[in-house]
Amino acid sequence: MIVGGRGAILAAVAKLPDSVTKALRRARIAFKRFAYSGFGRDRWQQPDRVVAELGLRPGDRVADLGAGGGYFTFRLARAVGPSGVVYAVDTDRDMPSALAARAVEQGLGNVVAVEAKPDEPGLPEPVDLSFLANSYHHLPDRRTYFALLARHLKPNGRVAIVEATPTGLHRLVGHATSPEAIRSELQAAGYTLVADHGFLPRQGFLVFEHRRTPQDD
């Protein structure tokens, strides 16, 4: 039997030497990065083709919502070039600082880490594109979220969603959303579907555009 429960565990961790605490944090972040990417993801995710289909231009502002371990973040950063910015947004308190450190290691000064709230991305400026990969299903109230997200988009800004389809294991664990549900929810939030890419074997890849109205301001 564990005496003291979670409080006792946290108290014990607080007494660990700083070097041990840092080592545990590095191990925790490494595990999370692996959990986000797994083995052989490049083969089925086709990240370079996904980014190419987004048609990003030098100087674009992009929000990588649910950036996780940065699988797409750094590819997006290279696509928009030094004059562009990629905001690596995540609600996991471990990830933004880890992504900022990796950006420095890779010499990418155009990656800005943002620690967000579940219902608010916390973006410091409007963006040309909000990109979500395997994070759509985590959002609690998606229609409200995307209606609010429109305020963080530039005029005619886009939202691109790469999301696992509910088949096989994804259907069992619930980490998936059907393209039909995504289309319905985004349209209800005021977006128009502008592209439906069908080349990913495990995921849908939909792109939406939002045309701002005075009610959005």
Image (cartoon, rainbow, N blue to C red):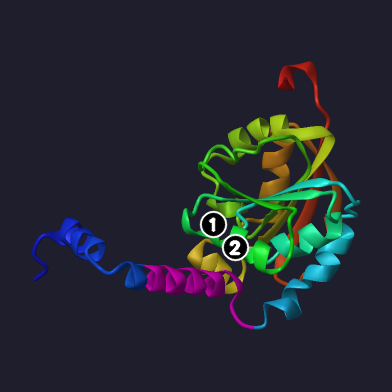
Magenta extent: 22-39
Could you tell me which secondary element the residue under label 1 belongs to? helix
Residue under numbered circle 1: 97
* Label 2, label 1: how far apart the Cα atoms are: 6 Å
Residue under numbered circle 2: 101
Q: Is residue 59 left or right of residue 131?
A: right
Numbered badge on residue 23: none
Question: Residue 214 at x, y = what percent?
Answer: 78, 16
Q: Residue furthest top?
A: 214
Q: Nearer the viewer, residue 2 or 43?
A: 2
| The quarter of the displayed image where residue 196 is located | bottom right
The quadrant in which the N terminus is found is: bottom left
| The quarter of the displayed image where residue 72 is located | bottom right
Name the chief secondary structure element in magenta.
helix
| Mark 2 residue crowding within 10 angstroms, few (<14) / some (14–19) / many (20+) | few
Mark 1 belongs to which amino acid?
Ser
Q: How many marks?
A: 2
Residue for point 85% across, 56% down: 81
Q: As displayed, is residue 126 above or below residue 9?
A: above
Q: Any magenta on residue 23? A: yes
Q: As displayed, is residue 206 above or below residue 25?
A: above
Question: Residue 189 at x, y = what percent?
Answer: 69, 33
| The quarter of the displayed image where residue 51 is located | bottom right
Question: Residue 68 at x, y = what percent?
Answer: 58, 61
Residues at discs 2 and 1 in contact (Cβ within 8 Å):
yes
Residue for point 84% across, 46% down: 60
Mark 2 belongs to which amino acid?
Ala
